[in-house]
Amino acid sequence: MALVRVTLSDPNDEYDPFSLDLFVDPAGILDDRIVTYGRWGKLKSDDIWPLIVRPNAGKGDTRLDFGFDSDLPTTDEERFAWTNICSKQIAPGEFVSVRYDGDEICYRVTQVKELPSGEDFRPTAPA
């Protein structure tokens, strides 16, 4: 099992990219038992939204949860997006769909970068 950062880009460059941290097996298939995190938008932009990646444990599409603003009413269509990434191999060039607020957008996996595992950050005893 590997932790990877996956970048999803709109081939038509109309929509902001997603960056998702996902656990995948050696074949590049999403482990649908683990909740992770991500963002929608560009890092150097005022329009960036953190999100929680909630796979549905083999029961369908993965939910992207943007949370809610306690000052504003938020509908399910505004709070959640859905993607079929759990049924795809996580590899550059693969296409996935994202449904949000009544629209379905086709994204391409443009980057998959393996991240250090938690074991890489264990404290070590001073020499």
Image (cartoon, rainbow, N blue to C red):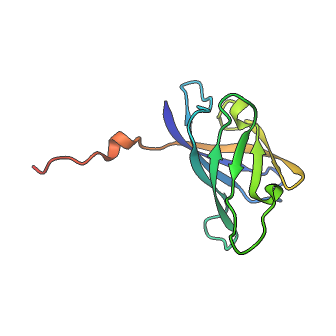
Looking at the picture, does residue 27 appear above or below residue 81? above
Residue at 61 percent of width and 65 percent of height: 43
Residue at 62 percent of width and 33 percent of height: 32
Residue at 89 percent of width and 52 percent of height: 103
Residue sitting at the far top: 27
Residue 92 lies, in percent from the top left, at 66, 38
Q: Is residue 127 left or right of residue 12?
A: left
Residue 95 lies, in percent from the top left, at 77, 38
Instruction: Report the number of numbered marks.
Output: 0
Nearer the observer, 124 or 60: 60
Residue 93 lies, in percent from the top left, at 72, 37
Residue 61 lies, in percent from the top left, at 75, 36
Q: Is residue 46 left or right of residue 119?
A: right
Looking at the picture, does residue 43 appear above or below residue 85? below
Which image quadrant for residue 45?
A: bottom right
Residue sitting at the far left: 127
Looking at the picture, does residue 27 appear above or below residue 51? above
Q: Is residue 79 left or right of residue 126?
A: right
Nearer the observer, 91 or 62: 62
